Image (cartoon, rainbow, N blue to C red):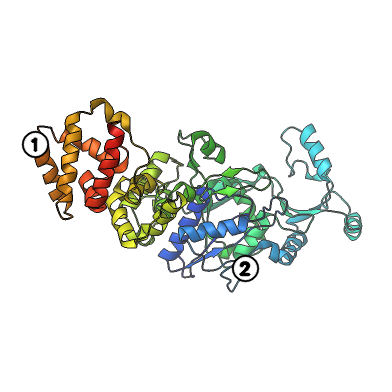
Amino acid sequence: MSDKKVRVRFAPSPTGGLHLGGVRTVLFNYLFAKKHKGDFVLRIEDTDQSRYVKGAEEYILECLEWCGLTPDEGPVAGGHYAPYRQSERKSIYREYAERLVGQGHAYYAFDTPEELERNRREIPNFQYGHAYRDTLRNSLSMPLHQVQQLIDAGEPHVIRIKMPDNEHIHFEDMIRGHVSFDTSQSDDKVLLKADGMPTYHLAVVVDDYLMKITHAFRGEEWLPSAPVHLLLWEYLGWKADMPQWAHLPLILKPDGHGKLSKRDGARLGFPVYAMNWFDEKTGDLTPGFRELGFLPEAFLNLLVMLGWNDGTDNEIFTLGELIEKFSIERVNKAGAKFDFEKAKWFNAEWIKRSEGGRLKPDVLKVLREKGVQVKDDDYLLTVINLVKERCMLLPDFYQQSSYFFEQPKEYDLNAVKPKWTDAKTAFFISFTGLLANTEDVLAVDLEQAFKTLAEENGIKAGELMLPFRIMLVGGKYGPHVFDIAALLGKKETISRIEKALAEFTR
């Protein structure tokens, strides 16, 4: 680690929903920065205006806010290296592109899209590079005066990097170790487009340099672009300031074959985006982890375990613990298979471990959306703490707790009526009489009274427990039935028994 202050960045394109792989990149950036008392920068890479989607930047910011991964600098937070949207930095990039042309490391290309498309059709495996560049319309194949005439006339053109032929370049990746490339395999990427906007290749290098980024974490799919970026750092004279790179492993489909995509999520029935994303152009709604009922703590926890571990069997970490324990050396090179059942397990564990007060706003939202009226906060907290171990996703709180606030609308009669007897009816009538003549009691006392009465009536208590549960909640779910009855109180318990008996004996 150098003596420079650590500065990392997340640089998404505002083109749609935020894939869980993107959030994991944010998380690894954030953890590394905080571990080393550094800065986490958000930079919006919106140079490709043809792919820009309205609302996507706001969506990204909301995702980061939900996850609790707050940037130290960015379009909203500001900072010493503003602006943080590349579209607002457009005037910066041409200077560096022209410098590269002047040095002989880049050139002007005047080929039209139609000409390039024709070449792709007619020439197998066509690449705009050392093999064909001298036969195309660019400043390497034309006389200088002709090039100047075209520029003066406003002829549309791009600036391309001139990749050297048959050179080997290399760097040390923080995850993969020594990585080398043959430059002959790379084409002459466009650096500056005809509209004056930079491509990712030029902008990422210029911005990382100007913003003093010390470490760059990105997905392994960007490895093929590394030769271009390495050369740009060298050609611009900034090699000594180049950030250390770490190319993160892919998040794979559940079967391990290929990168996990939105299409896979739709096919297999689980989200791959952090939050719901609505595409105004297509009208499609892509579901997200937040709306499905994941806690952000669980979402981050499951993401960090896709490619990293602390060397122990521990799987549950708070964000503070992750900051303390995170080490880039513990990130795996191999891709990590996504397991939705495991993801839900993380959420269930976080729900179980969370205090009722932490869960209350989320549970209140779930209940209110279903029309359940909650009037007493303390009562709600008691309910949450009683049922949370039975909830895997936040919407589960509706089934597991709504009966504490309203009587069942339906009963699982199929679980009761086939074995119902007059003796059971008589037992519950006696039990309501017993309740009416006692003060509200603890669950343990209620259970003892129930079992004693069953014995006196010659019925096994076990045959009465399921009917009692269904009387109180409507179905075969919920915590210990006497805990439910004690919390409901004797008056409400009696009311529910009497209402259910009318259904059971009909």
Query: How far apart are the alpha carbons under marks 1 and 2?
Result: 82 Å
Q: Tell me residue 268's x, y (percent).
A: 49, 34
Residue at the top extreme of this rendering: 418
Residue appearing at x 75%, y 44% in the figure: 128
Dot label at residue 455: 1
Q: Tell me residue 342's x, y (percent).
A: 38, 42
166 or 12, nearer to the observer: 12
Q: Amino acid at mark 1?
A: Glu
How crowded is the residue under tag 1: few (<14 C-alpha within 10 Å), some, or many (20+)? few
Name above or below for residue 292 compared with residue 106.
Answer: above
Residue 390 image-quadrant placement? top left
Q: Amino acid at mark 2?
A: Leu
Please indicate, yes or no, whether residue 292 appears anywhere in the rendered image: yes
Q: Secondary structure at mark 2?
A: helix
Q: Secondary structure at mark 1?
A: helix
In the picture of the structure, the residue carrying the numbered disc 2 is 210
Q: Is 168 left, or right, of 427 in this rendering?
A: right
Name above or below for residue 48 compared with residue 127.
Answer: below
Please indicate, yes or no, whether residue 314 appears anywhere in the rendered image: no
Q: Nearer the viewer, mark 1 or mark 2?
A: 1
